[in-house]
Image (tube, helix red, strand yellow):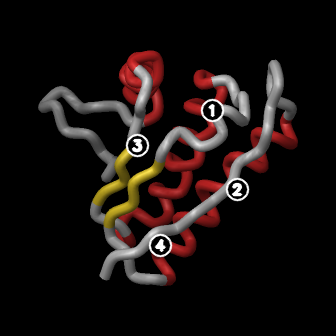
Amino acid sequence: MQGVIHTVGPIAQGEPSAAQAAELGGCYERSLKLAVENKLRTVAFPCISTGVFGYPNEAAADVVLHVLHKWLEENKEKVDRIILCVFLETDEMIYKEKLPRFFPVDACGNSHSRL
């Protein structure tokens, strides 16, 4: 089964508030819930709210990685793959830096997640 789940994230100008971070995290959580309800095993996410909505890229990456880590701890058997799609080289660098903090790799090079 294939599908598209659409979400709209918060608008942020400058440093996002705790409420905006919670709203952004909720976008990812609700999308994951819908994916599971619709029996989707692979989910791809863009960088929600970081474009014209102005959410700072690094702050957004912290939110999504925290949400995905927490969600996967409880639901890892419900998905096969979660893909983070980046358009900007800046986002690629941010995720390459932050991913190992949220999803450590063991000595054999194996990640303990499905991200």
Callout 1–callout 4 Cβ contact below 8 Å: no
Q: Residue at x 79, y 38 (%)?
A: 11
Q: For the point 86% across and 32% down, which residue is it?
A: 17
- Please report the residue visible at 35 percent of the width from the left and 69 percent of the height from the top: 77
- In the depicted structure, whether residue 16 falls above or below residue 24: above
Residue 50, image x, y percentages = 62, 32
Question: Label 4 to label 3, Cα distance in Å?
Answer: 15 Å
Residue 106 horizontal side relative to residue 41, left or right: left
**Amino acid type, callout 3:** Leu
Is 108 situated left or right of 61 in this image? left
Say which label, 2 or 1, has the lower sequence index: 2
Q: Position of residue 48 (x, y in %)?
A: 59, 43
Mark 2 to mark 1 CA distance (whole Å): 15 Å
Asked if 75 appears above or below 82 in the picture, the reply is: below
Q: Report the amino acid beneath label 1.
A: Thr
User: What residue is pinned by disc 3?
Assistant: 84
Q: Is residue 34 above or below residue 32?
A: below
| Mark 2, residue position | 26
Quick check: marks 3 and 2 in contact, CB under 8 Å? no
Tell me the distance, in whole angstroms, between the alpha carbons under discs 1 and 3: 13 Å
Q: Residues within 10 Å of mark 4 (few under 14, many from 20)?
A: many
Residue type, label 2 = Gly
Relative to 97, 51 lies left or right = right
Percent coordinates x, y for residue 95 in the rendering: 43, 26
Secondary structure at badge 3 equals strand
- According to the picture, the residue beneath numbered tag 4 turns out to be 35
Instruction: Point out residue 13 in the picture as x, y percentages from the top left corner.
Output: 82, 25
Q: Which residue is mark 1?
A: 50
Residues 96 and 77: in front is 96
Which of the 4 image quadrants contains residue 72? bottom left
Distance from Cα at disc 1 to Cα at disc 4: 22 Å
